[in-house]
Amino acid sequence: MGPDVSLDEQDCGFQGRSHLKDKIKYKKEGDGFLADCICDSGYTWTFHFRHDPTPMPLTQKHASDLHNRCLYLIKRLKFQWTRIYMDNLFTSRRFLQWGYEEKVLMAGVARATARGVPDCVVQVEAKSKADLEKAVGCVKVARTADFKIIAASVYDAKPVHFLSSIHTKVHMITKTRTVWSTENKCRQELGFERLNTADDYNNNMNGVAAVNSYLLYKRQCELRKV
């Protein structure tokens, strides 16, 4: 397992009858059993099904069942100060603090309300075209008093908020991508700027997605053989 892993939900498709099965319309696997997983490089390193109770005393009495399951997974990691990336279902300021106590670093996109993002960082979605032109590219950053957690927001197509105990500073980085030029009739390199927290999130958050894609491909191959 590398230093950067991802935490997300994984769907195990199941077409039979079970009172534990969830109806899932937002994943290709369809209905089945949901599990919280820590994955890296196409491998699932540890997981726990959501319909099973957490097999340990609650680590944090004020934590939700979701966060206590995730803390259980974190306790099973062999290496300290692993960097974990996650989406807005998991990300909250308290969860990052609890993770720091377990000697892991975490980062992810966060919901603007009820997740610990400070008001000074929250950006509101623009309602007019003029307001949108003024807001695009705006970056706001704040840090907790103990310097352990950074909150940041950037206005892209709409506001995106981040919480991180991984990053020590927030800045824009220059990226390039190949696009087709209609004037020159060829492919050219186009430069653009992206927040470093967003770039790290995009590059390290696909661990669970890679596992899901591999499992779906494997199942399709097995069905073709039948």
Image: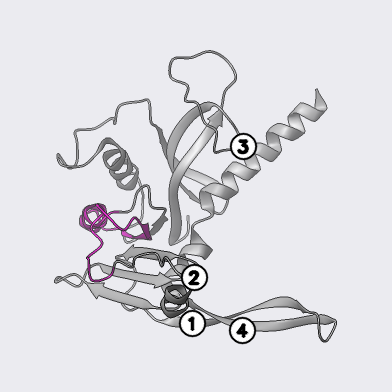
Disc 3 to disc 2, how far (Cα)? 26 Å
SS for callout 3:
loop
User: Residue 127, relative to residue 5: is it above or below?
Assistant: below
User: Residue 80, relative to residue 11: is it above or below?
Assistant: below
Disc 4 to disc 3, how far (Cα)? 34 Å
Asked if disc 3 and disc 1 are in contact, CB closer than 8 Å, the reply is no
Res. 215 image quadrant:
top right
SS for callout 4:
strand
The residue labelled by disc 2 is 199
Residue 13 horizontal side relative to residue 2, left or right: right
The residue labelled by disc 3 is 28
The residue labelled by disc 1 is 173
Rendered residue at 39%/78% (across/down)? 138
Report the magenta residues as a range. 92-121
Rendered residue at 48%/27% (across/down)? 33
Where residue 92 appears, as percent x and y from the top left, is: 28, 54
Q: Is residue 167 visible?
A: yes
